Image (spheres, rainbow, N blue to C red):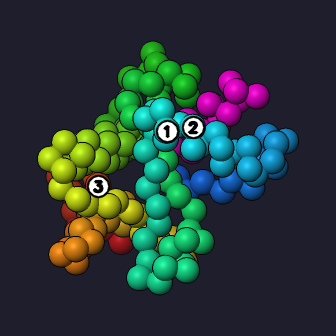
């Protein structure tokens, strides 16, 4: 169970996690999957990024995303340790996004900046990768992460 759980968690890196769907596929309870992800966060192996909405109810219903703390560990879990990521591929972009998000989380902790981090997704699937919110000052910064060498405006939906 543990090996399969780690592989599934690696495959779900940076994607909204449906605990009940994963539990159904892995033949374990939803609660077991929630506890597994909680352990990953408690052990600082992964960071949880919740969905953002101005409605607290919608925010609580949105599926969280998890990002592993290190791209090398993520590659090992996914069985891709010996495969060089190629710029322009989905894998390269996913690893780049993971790296940027983890660095933002680390810098926020180090400088005690007080930001909370979220992602935002519409019902039609349009997404903003990263939302940084500062509670007391009402600052909101939306960040779209692109690994292109020359990003174009049409890359942003």
Rendered location of residue 137, percent (x, y)? 18, 75
The residue drawn where x is 55% and y is 80% is 57
Taking depth in this image into account, of 26 and 47 the one nearest to the observer is 47
> Is residue 27 within the magenta segment?
no
Spatial CA span between label 2 and label 1: 5 Å
Left or right: 35 as drawn, with respect to 143: right
Few, some or many C-alpha atoms within 10 Å of disc 2 (few <14, some 14-19, many ≥20)? few
> Is residue 8 within the magenta segment?
yes
Left or right: 31 as drawn, with respect to 57: right
**Residue 32 to residue 114: above or below:** above
Spatial CA span between label 3 and label 1: 26 Å
- The disc at residue 42 is 1
In this rendering, the label closer to the viewer, 3 or 1? 1
Task: Give the labeled residue for mark 3.
Answer: 145
Decide: marks 2, 1 in contact (CB < 8 A)? yes
Few, some or many C-alpha atoms within 10 Å of disc 3 (few <14, some 14-19, many ≥20)? some
Under tag 1, what secondary structure? helix
**Residue 87 to residue 31: above or below:** above
Which residues make up the magenta segment?
1-13
- The disc at residue 39 is 2
The residue drawn where x is 44% and y is 77% is 53
Rendered location of residue 27, percent (x, y)? 85, 41
Decide: marks 3, 1 in contact (CB < 8 A)? no
- Is residue 137 among the parts visible in the rendering? yes
Under tag 2, what secondary structure? helix
Rendered location of residue 22, percent (x, y)? 72, 48
């Amino acid at each position: 169970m543990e090996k399969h759980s780690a592989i599934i968690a690696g495959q779900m890196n940076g994607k909204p996690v449906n605990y009940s769907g994963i539990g159904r596929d892995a033949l374990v309870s939803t609660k077991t999957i929630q506890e597994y992800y909680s352990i990953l966060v408690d052990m600082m192996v992964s960071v949880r990024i919740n969905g953002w909405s101005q409605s607290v109810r919608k925010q609580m219903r949105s599926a969280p995303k998890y990002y592993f703390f290190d791209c090398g560990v993520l590659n090992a879990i996914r069985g891709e340790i010996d495969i060089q990521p190629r710029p322009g591929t989905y894998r390269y972009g996913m690893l780049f996004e993971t790296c940027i998000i983890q660095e933002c989380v680390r810098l926020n902790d180090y400088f005690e900046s007080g930001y909370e981090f979220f992602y935002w997704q519409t019902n039609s699937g349009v997404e903003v990768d990263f939302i940084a919110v500062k509670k007391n000052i009402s600052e909101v910064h939306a960040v779209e992460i692109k690994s292109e060498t020359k990003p174009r405006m049409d890359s942003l939906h």
